[in-house]
Amino acid sequence: MLGSSPMDLHLFLVVLGIFVLLLIASLLQPAAQRLNFPFTVLLAAAGVVLGVIVMVVPDKESAGIAGDFLHAIENLDITSEAVFFLFLPALIFESAMSINVRHLMKDIKPILMLAIIGLLISTFAVGFAMEAISGVGFVACLLLGAIVSATDPVAVVAIFKDLGAPKRLTILVEGESLFNDATAIVLFIILAAVMVAGADASAGNAAVDFIKVFFGGIAVGLIAARTMAWIIGTMRNMPLVEITLTVVLAYLSFLIAEHYLHVSGVMAVVTAGLVMGSYGRTKISPATWHALHETWEQLGFWANSLIFFLVGILVPNVLKDFTGEQAIWLVVLIVVAFAARSIVLFGILPAMIRAKLSAPVSGAFRTIMFWGGLRGAVSLALALVIFETEGVDQDVKNFIIVLVTCFVLFTLFINATTIRFVMAMFGLDKLSPADVAVRDRVMSLSLSRIRDEIHAVAEAQQVAPKLAGEIAENYTKRLAVLERQVSNTAELSAGDRVKIGLGILVNREREIFLKRFSDGVASDDITRALLANADTLEDGMKAAGVDGYEEAVTQKLGFGFGFRVAMYLQRKFGLTSALQSQLAERFEVLIATQTALRQLREITSKNMECLLGEDAARHLKDIVDQRAQDTDRALDALKLQYPEYFEAVQRYQIGRVAVRLEDLDYRRMLSEQLISPDVYANLSQELDFRAEEFEKVPELDLGLNPEEMVAKVPFFVGLDQASIRQIVALLRPRLVLPDEKIITKGEAGDAMYFVSTGALEVDIGDSPILLGSGDFFGEMALVHDAPRSADVKALSYCRILRLSVREFRTLIGSQPDLKETIERVAAERLTGK
């Protein structure tokens, strides 16, 4: 039973108001879908209606629960703190986590230009125009410009999802909004400090403050997200804990950044969301990932529903004294704000594209971005901050709150409701010809299969054959209509069909890698590397079709920048840990790729012909077969050099699979009531102990121990231990990669080499010379003080010992027998014997 104290009554009204608003929002969602109307706009409209009802109903006490609800709405104060600290972190984190970071980074230049340069242009354009027409102070007008320049894509992105708009367009709009909001808030803080406290307004100080606050927020979000991802990674298969920690991350990163470090909380949450959506994908348990997204969608729905309701409820009270002069100001504000945005999108962005500073953005995309720049929660919250701040003139408060509220309403009720028609003008609400062709082909296959199976289903369900025949006839008619439609559609080219097939295979490959992670076969680090490889293949395919795909395959089978750095560290400083990690990762990546390609071969053989035609399927099979051969060769080269490690990795992987299968079997028996929960708990506990054996990836021994390498070179056999120790001190071990050139013809000789293991080729013309374990090379340039006479490259992974020219002279000076042998071999090679 509730008490009668004012605090109890206030809490009761707050709870009543919030949950009735959520009830109304839940009922409006299906109505918005049925009416084909933006949900957020419908929420704001409903809020306006509620606000009007609250104002015009005088006696709320006698209206029962409805009166209590209206009284709750009347006292449900919306404050800037509520928007910033309660709603904003949830909205921003949910949006950032759903963005593909790789796609975002491709367009990061135009996004940052719009979010920073575009916002500054809009802010100053509005500031100058509003000062000229209103007579309000310049700083206050700049504040207004910063506030109305903060975009909110919630409504338009929802429309994009409904219409299946191009993904890149969604990334551009949503990415701009995330960074734009942060920029607007940072600029707002600087300008508000100038207006309220008379702070130093120099451009230099403002720029320094902006950089500190903006990038400080990024640093906070990055550190917080990586730390939280590490914590989550230690709590596998604990969905409630994992999801809770992401909620903690969103709010704590915002609070720590804003309250304690005085940097951008928005940028902290944006960064945390982006990191958790990419890096965190392989830290969070696969079974939890789907539930995590559903949870954040739910939180986003609640936050959006309440905030747009509250925006609408606020409108009648704010605009009750709206004047004709304010209407003129509003018209000027709308014209100037949209004019500034058009200058950025149709002037500066094309200039960036011509200067090769940005990937091309079509005129259709720029038009949608122009009209889709809606305003919402952030603009309203910033206006409320000014309205609640002491020391600000009341006329300035009214000036900002009225114009911001009207501007937000204009973008919601005009832009959001018409964006669908603007997209239709450019055909962006339709599937591409390639997607239409795939859709029609898939539908044709599905209708044909269902028509053929309907009689068997009817017989199993004991349905009369006549009824089954009627349903089958309906499918036959639909199939005939579809086939006529397909016959009237332009045929896809062979290249388009193959490109579509490659896209399907890349997506399937990505799912295979995630399944390996889900099954516990691959670690999070290896899964990230595999997904990055799949992303590279997709980029190459989209950019240049088959050629781009094959070039990406070659690139990923090669040795990248990280590998080169690891090689440099080993050769220059003798540090081997980075090279060990790179080779171990290459082993697991190649094994996983080899497994995935076997599955892709099966998919190509079974599904591609019926979907894309015989010629395209054959071409795809050839591409997959060639890639499989290249992958096999790369893996075989590693296996030949490190056979023991290959076996250890296989044992590690099959052990993890066995543990996973055992766990699934126990879960099945529990679900079928074959064992009790107590028995299952005991079995799981024992399984956890056995699983520890396969938790740690085997450690790779590079085999670069100088003593062991010298022992494998027959050239040094027979030397006493003192001589061996002297030689070991002079030689430097080195791992050489396949196809790596060790010596280049014509260059000055600075060292000779002894082969411990591996195979190399000396290019002397038509008949190259093969070198193997125990051979040495490079001595001729040192003995005769002449340039290199041939190229030498590795045919496989090789372990060699390098003897520099200075150490060479030391060695032959102290070992006459070695000197004689080296000089004899050099003379024989010089004369061709």
Image: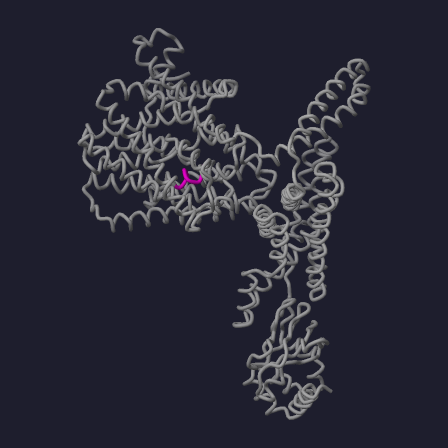
Can I make out residue 518 in this image?
no
Which corner quadrant of the image does residue 776 belong to?
bottom right
Q: Position of residue 315 (x, y in %)?
A: 32, 21
| Residues drawn in magenta | 174-179
Q: Is residue 220 above or below residue 144?
A: below
Can I make out residue 180 in this image?
yes
Q: Position of residue 575 (x, y in %)?
A: 54, 69
The answer to which of 680 and 281 lies nearer the viewer is 281
Q: Residue shown at 39%/11% (left/top)? A: 66
Q: Position of residue 76 (x, y in %)?
A: 34, 22
> From the image, which quarter does the N terminus lie in?
top left
Q: Residue shown at 29%/51% (left/top)? A: 208
Residue 175 within the segment the image draws in magenta: yes
Give left or right: position of 529 versus 123: right
Q: Is residue 229 above or below residue 449?
A: below
Residue 562 within the segment the image draws in magenta: no
The answer to which of 245 and 795 lies nearer the viewer is 795
Q: Residue shown at 68%/32% (left/top)? A: 442
Which corner quadrant of the image does residue 488 belong to?
top right
Give left or right: position of 668 versus 510: right
